[in-house]
Amino acid sequence: MPLKKIEIKNFTVFKDLKISFVKGINIFVGENGMGKTHLMKVLYAASQAAREDVSFSYKLVRVFKPDNLQIHRLINRTAGNAIAEVKVYSEDAYISIKFNNKTKKWDGEVAGESKWEKQPPELTSTFIPAKEILSNAWNLEAAVNKNNVDFDDTYVDIVTSAKIDISKGKNPTTRKGYLDILQKITQAKVVINKEKFYLMSGSQAKIEFQLVAEGIRKIALLWQLIKNGTLENGSILFWDEPEANINPVCIPVIVDMLLKLQNNGVQIFISTHDYILSKYFEIRRETEESVRFYSFFCEGKGKDRGVTCEINESFKELKNNPIMKAFDSLLDEVYENHTGKCQ
């Protein structure tokens, strides 16, 4: 069930936005505060709502965590008393939600749920937050449920996804190819003992996740998700800033892994600030249709000011590209430093 399109009005930073997606890898770039993570959270909540036991409206407030789970706090603050609307489309159905300043708790007006829930049952959606969380996984769900700690559902869900093995009956050969590549970086496998995550290499004693570099922990998480069958044909992966705390040497390996996953039917959404990651996707993809870039930026003035989006199959052809602007500025300074001349 690849996601096909989203339409948003007066939701968080967005005033009026319509975007179509590719079945492969969708890469969101833009300065901080442009709504990249917000957009992925909306899409993730919609994907989760394909399950009969998950409400779209409740999942929205759980992934955003507004005060007291009041959904009306997700209305664009410059829109006054406007109505917020979100509509997400797959190839065969849609799900939408509408709410205003008088909407209580998470009681938004949801439409399209019945058909949305009849989509393929093998669909799974996974959201990897920017901050690694498995090192804090022990008793996390219980602590969140008792309000002892305050994590949004993306963190709780990824811990659950890492723990549960749903790989039975699925192709182990393809997974093994992925795992062998990632294991060259981690030099170990992920093991779980009493709800705690460890890395174990050969016959050596297991090492607590807290004692492992965060970059290695993030790659180990990807290893675990592939191993337990979470990332299979028909699934959707959302990854917020995969480059965070990752050794740049590992970036091309991650890119190749994600390209292989999309070739095998996994739709992928990524938010990034990284030049190296973006360029590797551009030069290593097999077809332009498999990767698309989305640059988010503000335009307009006063009450009409809002976030909009530029879309291009080419990273270097994006006109509003803060990553390229920062990289070009660095090159200018390097040139000036070495030559004493300004370009």
Image (cartoon, helix red, strand yellow):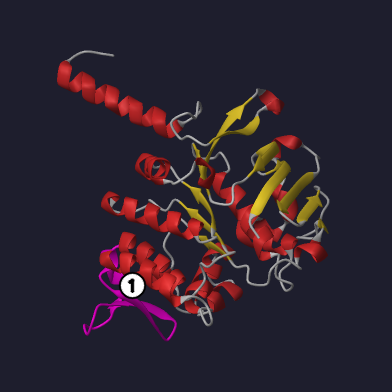
Q: Is residue 39 left or right of residue 58?
A: left
Residue at horizontal 49 percent and vertical 47 percent from the top: 271
Residue type highlighted by circle 1:
Phe
Q: Position of residue 219 (x, y in %)?
A: 36, 63
The question of residue 204 being in magenta is answered with yes
Pick the residue in front: 115 or 36: 115
**Label 1 secondary element:** helix
Residue 68 can be seen in this image: no
Residues rendered magenta in the picture: 185-213
Identify the image quadrant of the C terminus.
top left
Q: Position of residue 289 (x, y in %)?
A: 54, 43
Q: Position of residue 196 (x, y in %)?
A: 40, 80
Q: Is residue 296 left or right of residue 105?
A: left
Q: Position of residue 74 (x, y in %)?
A: 69, 49
Please tell me in which quadrant of the rendered image residue 331 appears.
Answer: top left
Q: Is residue 189 left or right of residue 93?
A: left
Reading the image, the residue beneath label 1 is 209
